[in-house]
Amino acid sequence: RGLVGTTGLDGHDRGVMGGAKALSHAGMEVIYGGLHLRPGQIAKVAAEESVDVVGLSSLSDNHRALVPRIMEELKKVGLDDVMVLLGGFIQDEDVPVMKAAGVAEVFGVGTRLEDIAKYIRTHVRPA
C-alpha cells in the first residue's frame, strides 16, 4: 500500500499520476495524495492510511529542502520504517544527500515504471 504525491509548490502531476496508475496496474494499492503537499500532510495521510511506501515526485528542485522535513514528520508520527522513494529531476549530486536523509531510492526521469514496481516488491517490508 503506497502514497504518492508532489511536494511544496511542485504542480507537475503527469509523472506521479502515471506512476500511480502503473503501480495500481501492477497490483499495488495506491493512494494519490495530490499536489502541493506539505511535509506534515504527507506524514498525516501516510499514518492514517497505514502505508508501506511513500513515493514523492520533485520536478521543481525543492527536494533538498522538503525531503528532510518529510522524513522528520514521518518519524514524528511513528513511520520511520516506511520506505520513501523519490522521483523526478534529481541532480546526481543530490542522490547521496537524499539517501542520507532516509530516502530508500531515487528514480530519475525516464526510469521505467516496471523497474520502480520491481524495486518496491523486492524491498518493501513484509505485511
Image (tube, rainbow, N blue to C red):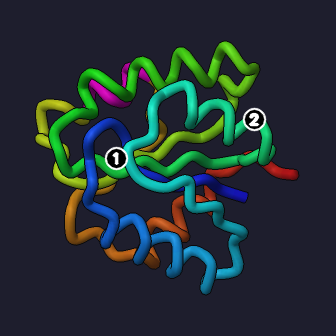
Residue at position x 29%, y 69% from top?
Answer: 111
Tell me the crowding category of disc 1: few under 14, some 14 to 19, or many 20 or more residues within 10 angstroms, Cα based.
Answer: many
Q: Residue 25: give x, y in percent of width and height.
A: 61, 86
- Picture quadrant of residue 109: bottom left
**With 73 as the anchor, is 124 left or right in this view?**
right
Return the residue nearer the eye: 50 or 107. Answer: 50
Q: Amino acid at mark 2?
A: Ala
Q: Quadrant of the N terminus?
A: bottom right
Residue 107 position (above or below residue 60):
below
Q: Residue 44: give x, y in percent of width and height.
A: 67, 32
Residue at position x 72%, y 20% from top?
Answer: 77
**With 125 as the anchor, is 39 left or right in this view?**
left
**With 7 as the anchor, is 65 left or right in this view?**
left
Report how many numbered discs are placed on residues in the image: 2
Residue at position x 68%, y 41% from top?
Answer: 45
Circle 1 residue: 106
Q: Main secondary structure of the magenta part?
A: helix
Circle 2 residue: 47
- Label 1 element class: strand
Query: Residues in magenta?
Result: 96-101
Q: Amino acid at mark 1?
A: Val
